[in-house]
Amino acid sequence: MIRLFAFILVVLALGWGFAWLADRPGSISIAWQDYLIETSLIVAATAVAVLIGAVMLLWWLIQLIWTSPHSVRRYFRSRKRDRGYQALSTGLIAAGAGNATLARKMSLRAQGLLRADQEPLLQLLDAQAALIEGRHDDARAKFERMADDPETRELGLRGLYVEARRLGADGAARQYAERAAENAPYLPWAAQATLEYRCRAGRWDDAIRLLDQQRIANVIEKKQAERWKAVLLTAKAGERLEADPKGARDDALAALKHAKDLVPAAIIAAKAYLREDNIRRAASVLEGVWKTAPHPEIATSYVRARSGDSAVDRLKRAEKLEAMRPNNVESLIAVAEAALDARELEKARSKAEAAARMSPRESIYLLLADIEEADTADQGRIRHWMGQALRAPRDPAWVADGIVSERWLPVSPTTGRIDAFEWKVPYGQLEGPIEEGDLAERAIAELPPVDEPPEPELTEEEPREEPLQPQQPDVKAAPTETPAAAPDVAEKAEQKKEMITLPAAAPAKPDATQRDAANVDETEEDPFFHRRPDDPGVKDPNASREPSNRLRLF
């Protein structure tokens, strides 16, 4: 476009110049030796222009003839290169499609038309053809040669990494990924693999440093990088909590700055503060995360922050959480549990039923069963809530890649993915039949009434024989007479006392074996430092011996 514009400007300038000369006529005389040449100015200008054009044309002809051998050679070379690139392109497409025969054919043709030192893709096509044909050793050798070349180093390391992963050589794969990440931290696959390997090995400082490099190189988005850094800082704080509570606290607080709703970071920071006896700061951290993301673990840590609190004090702390997030399932559950411990059963029941109406789940119905047992001890009502728990949806848990964990983990144990665990209902668990309508309202409505125990009736009962004490001498019980109907309760009770005390017969004479066993028992020492254990279920034989000739039945 620029050259066309310049050509137009030159033509316009020449036209304007000739028009200017035509408007101003004149003559030119040239005397050279014996010749005198006279002509007009316009003719002289035209002759000069024609002369310049002829010289330029002559120069172009001379240059064309002089460079013709090179031009012919360049033409054939470019034609050959074009055919080679066409074969290379066809071979790469065939390799991607899995056509081993065509890929090998195009590889050989491209190698004959192109030079390997000038086109590195020939090595890639050859390696891919070897992989498709199943010659993995040859492919690895070609990838190693590519890794030694600075121009194809990244491509060779990528091929070696994939082969190592295919063979299950995690150590070799980690080395290739780290080598590629050191030379080119902007490679997403190398940085991601290296980051996962360092996290699995617990090298949190190296992982955080690599994550910062990826963020600077714009390999990872800013939001994702902030979240991952918070996860890595939380994992680091969790490992330092026992040995260095102060360092763990600093790491956990830094993690909360990057992700304000990260529940494990808040719990670790609160535990670190509690080890420093700073309950106020621990409660402040838990309250801040509770307002953003209510979680049962935060509620448990907050309610039981002070070990010396009574059940009433814990109930007050749970009610404080409810005031921060009213009409929330986790708030209602926390208050219901604390009220059950404080024996405020009416409040516990109302909060648990409200939580069940809001989000019915297994733990809420089990909590209602505990409340029912503490309140009425009615087995029918308890079994009713247990049955509802069996049909209710499961409780949320830490889930990642189909694995349910009792505690939060920074990486997935199967795939190594960072920040894989989520607090949600696990998949694949058996649930009850799907029912329509409000399950909680139906469960509350179907709750059976409390069964009141019937009043005991005073009727005549036959004497009931109770089991005797083991290893007692044979006693022949004397027959007893059935008392007549008592006119009042006092006489009936007196007759029952007489029934349970029977006269003992004369003890049988023990044989020699029994006498030896008795002697051994008397000389044997009692366990637990020569005394019986302090257990109400164990009777002291010396204390039970009475100088009476009557045997008491239990």
Image (cartoon, rainbow, N blue to C red):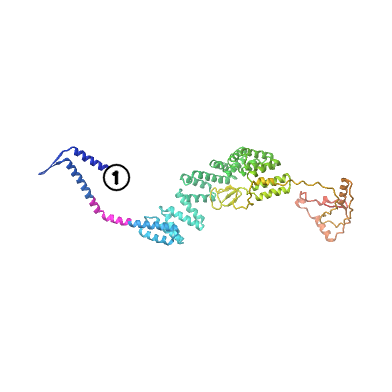
Q: Residue at x 49, y 56 (%)?
A: 164
Looking at the picture, how far across and down is residue 470, in whole percent? 81, 56
- Above/below status of 208 relative to 124: above
Please give the name of the residue rendered at 51% of the width and 55% of the height, measured from the top-left corner.
170
Residue that protrudes farthest toward the front in the picture: 437
Name the chief secondary structure element in magenta.
helix
User: Quadrant of residue 278 in the image?
Assistant: top right
Q: Is residue 304 in sight in this rendering?
A: no
Which residue is the extreme one toward the left? 34
Q: Say whether residue 362 is visible.
A: yes
Q: Secondary structure at mark 1?
A: helix
In the rendered image, residue 21, in percent from the top left (x then y), is placed at 19, 39
Label tally: 1
Whether the magenta-drawn stretch holds residue 77 is answered as: yes
What residue type is disc 1 on?
A: Leu
Residue 173 percent coordinates (x, y): 49, 54
Quadrant containing the N terminus is top left
**Label 1 packing within 10 angstroms: few (<14), some (14-19), many (20+):** few
**Which residue does the numbered mark 1 point to in the structure image?**
4
Please tell me which residue lies in front, 66 or 38: 38
Q: Is residue 17 magenta?
A: no
**Range of residues picked out in magenta:** 60-78
Residue in view at x 41 percent, y 61 percent? 102
